[in-house]
Amino acid sequence: MPAETRSMHRLVVIICLAFLSGCTALQSPRPAAPVRSMDAGAYEELNELLRQHAQRWLDTPYQFGGASHEGVDCSGLIQRVYADALGVALPRTTAQQIREGRRVRPGRSLPGDLVFFEPDGKGSHAGIVLGDNEFLHASSSRGVMISPLDHGYWSRHITTARRILPEEDVPLILSRHERGAVGVPDLTVR
């Protein structure tokens, strides 16, 4: 085949490829799947569930490294409540827990989010956000309690909040709880 004919074939192929790639760009895009946002009702149910489990832990004494009703520290409390109430396995320490989920601004936290603090010279501290701007935690001086997030002390020392439960998992967790299928962690954090 003469060089001139080969060049013409290449040119035709290039024009066809350019035309075909241009056609795909001109096609109307598929509509994106609708993003389902969580309704407030699901978070109210989650808040109630967390508060029920919180009641079981209130006044449990603080014990560094503890994870039982005999004594518990803040990260042990978080790990146990997440496992028992939500069926979600979390790591044991605050240093590990603070790397889970995704970061959210503390003022935008929702029930189930974790909040982390750095109190003056006392190491790190963490708790689980409840509704009504409160959080569940294991105080080293008063044991397990519920405190207001906007209290001067806590609001001055908060460092971050983490969303552990993706919105799409909340209905699944609530459904599993209604069926009595929680207690053994089988959901993994993303």
Image (spheres, helix red, strand yellow):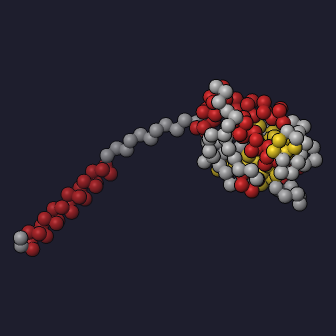
Residue 37 visible? The answer is yes
Residue depicted at x 70% and y 29%: 45
In the picture, measured across the screen, residue 122 lies left or right of residue 106, that is: right
Which residue is nearer to you in this view: 115 or 40? Answer: 115
Which residue is depicted at the point 88% across and 48% down?
Answer: 63
Instruction: From the viewer's side, name the closer residue of 52 and 31.
Output: 52
Question: Percent x, y for residue 68?
Answer: 83, 41
As drawn, the residue found furthest toward the bottom would be 3
Examine the image and state in which quarter residue 130 appears: top right
Q: Residue at x 13, y 70 (%)?
A: 7
Question: Relative to residue 108, is residue 188 drawn left or right?
Answer: left
Q: Position of residue 49 (x, y in %)?
A: 73, 31
The picture places residue 117, in percent across and down from the top left corner, at 81, 53
Q: Quadrant of the N terminus?
A: bottom left
Against 123, is 155 above or below?
above
Residue lying farthest right? 141
